[in-house]
Image: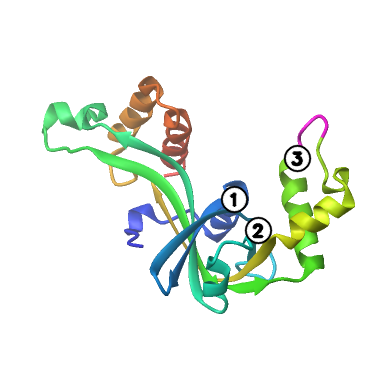
Amino acid sequence: MYVPKSFEPPDADTLLQFMHARSFGVLVTMTSHGLDGTHLPFVFDSQPSPNGTLRGHVARANPIWRECQGAEAMVIFQGPDSFISPSWYPSKQETGTVVPTWNYVVVHAHGTVRVVEDEAWLRAHVEALTNRHEANREKPWAVSDAPAHYIEKMVGAIVGIEMPIDRLTGKWKLSQNRSERDRAGVVSGLLRDGSESAPTMAALVKGALDNR
């Protein structure tokens, strides 16, 4: 991924926090049929340092797990993104030399995949994944709420995917290459925009502006 210096992420911890918060990713692997993208929820473990480990699972019926054992792979985590209109830049009125662009936040995690069929590992994984996303509910569902024989059947129908992260890259494209006035214009424009991701993107651009 091409990352100009202006769009480098704030620090390594930001990448780790982003993966934890935006845990639905795309596992990209090379198979005998070409590139494959598998969309999965991941559990991020901060160990071993410095980059940690990603854990997920696929259906046993999915042939991807037979292809990716020991293979190099990349997991893509995407954050908010927004179209940026040049009409939001004060400099448009002065020079006219502006064009549209797109702001976005993304993290790429690279590593080697290990396939896991161990029942205890799989049970612990689905419990960790469930507990993470049920924790804030008024009445959280737990794996133990379902009959034991049913959970055993369900666990037998999946295969684990584990990837220690060898390398992390990220791109925080938040109008940092524009002047302070133009960036302030982007924030105002986004807040007027009304699209779903605009308020989140406006906060990110403002944060980058405040921390200049």
Question: Dot 3 lies on which element?
Answer: helix
Q: Quadrant of residue 212?
A: top left
Query: Circle 3: is it few (<14), some (14-19), or many (20+) Cα within 10 Å?
Result: some
Q: Could you tell me which residue is drawn at 77 percent across and 33 percent down? A: 137
Q: Position of residue 126 (x, y in %)?
A: 74, 55
- Per the image, the residue denoted by label 1 is 23
Q: Position of residue 63 (x, y in %)?
A: 54, 66
Question: Dot 2 lies on which element?
Answer: strand
| Residue 100 appearing in the image | yes
> Which label lies toward us, 2 or 3?
3
Q: Quadrant of residue 195?
A: top left
- Per the image, the residue denoted by label 2 is 44
Q: Could you tell me which residue is drawn at 51 percent across and 77 percent down? A: 71
**Residue located farthest toward the bottom when viewing the structure as drawn:** 70
Amino acid type at circle 1 is Ser
Amino acid type at circle 3 is Glu
- Per the image, the residue denoted by label 3 is 134
Q: Nearer the viewer, residue 62 or 2?
A: 62
Q: Earlier in the sequence, mark 1 or mark 3?
A: 1
Q: Is residue 95 above or below residue 27?
A: above
Q: Nearer the viewer, residue 29 or 151?
A: 151
User: Answer yes or no: do the residues labelled 1 and 3 have beta carbons within 8 Å?
Assistant: no
| Residue 174 appearing in the image | no
Q: Nearer the viewer, residue 141 or 188?
A: 141
Q: Position of residue 81 (x, y in %)?
A: 40, 40
User: Answer yes or no: do the residues labelled 2 and 3 have beta carbons within 8 Å?
Assistant: no
User: Answer yes or no: do the residues labelled 2 and 1 have beta carbons within 8 Å?
Assistant: yes
Magenta region:
135-139
Query: Circle 2: is it few (<14), some (14-19), or many (20+) Cα within 10 Å?
Result: many
